[in-house]
Amino acid sequence: MTPDYFEFYELHESFRPDEAAIKRKYYALSREYHPDFHATASSERQQEILQLATLNTNAYRTLSDSDQRMAYILRRHDLLEEGKQEMPADFLMEVMDLNEQLMELEFEPDPETVQRVEIEVQDLSDTLDAGIEPVVAGYEGLPVDTRPQALQQIRTYYLKKRYLLRIKESLTKFATRS
């Protein structure tokens, strides 16, 4: 079971937490759980401090990065199972043309096509970001019974963004070749 990083940092689950509060909590706990301050403690206590220091580092890394935080929240709600991510059919249809252009670039590198596809991917990405922003920003204030619906929307957004990221990575390869 994954530890509750929000609880550990005494924060509410949020896609937009107070980043300054995360940093303050991280530094405070880093001092509190620094092994040097517990050198004379029992070996059990030293082991416990080491685990808490590791938990603090993992919590900070996860909560301070928006993509990792999103994936973390979705996993906590059992919405990201590896290998079981189905993309919405309408989205797949939308990016099919992009994938076809990528396949053509494999055989015929063309800087103009790379640039055109990059623009299309960025436009698609910007549209996704704009569409999910109100859901992400308002999540913390939602009644608990409406959160599952918001989480499903965020999950779909997350999967689409990951897909577009893979296309961008492919484009980067083609851009360096041409």
Image (cartoon, rainbow, N blue to C red):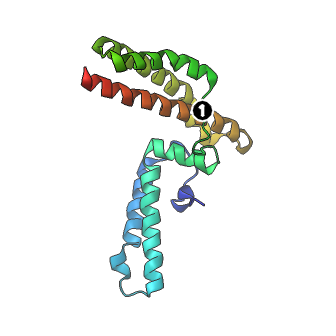
* Residue named by callout 1: 156
Visible in this render: residue 25? no
The residue nearer to you, when weighing 78 against 143, is 78
Relative side of 13 to 100, left or right: right
Amino acid type at circle 1 is Thr
- Looking at the image, the residue that sits furthest to the right is 145
| Percent x, y of residue 78 | 64, 48
In the image, residue 150 sits, relative to residue 172, either above or below, namely: below
Quarter occupied by residue 157:
top right
Relative side of 148 to 64, left or right: right
Determine the residue positioned at 41% across, 21% down. 122
In the image, residue 52 sits, relative to residue 73, either above or below, namely: below
Determine the residue positioned at 25% across, 26% down. 176
Quarter occupied by residue 84:
top right
Determine the residue positioned at 54% across, 49% down. 72
- Dividing the image into 4 quarters, which one contains the N terminus? bottom right
Quarter occupied by residue 143:
top right
* Element type where label 1 sits in the image: helix
- Looking at the image, the residue that sits furthest to the front is 107
Label 1, residues with CA under 10 Å away: few <14, some 14-19, many ≥20:
some
- Dividing the image into 4 quarters, which one contains the C terminus? top left
| Percent x, y of residue 174 | 31, 23
In the image, residue 49 sits, relative to residue 108, either above or below, namely: below
Determine the residue positioned at 43% across, 80% down. 46
* Label total for image: 1
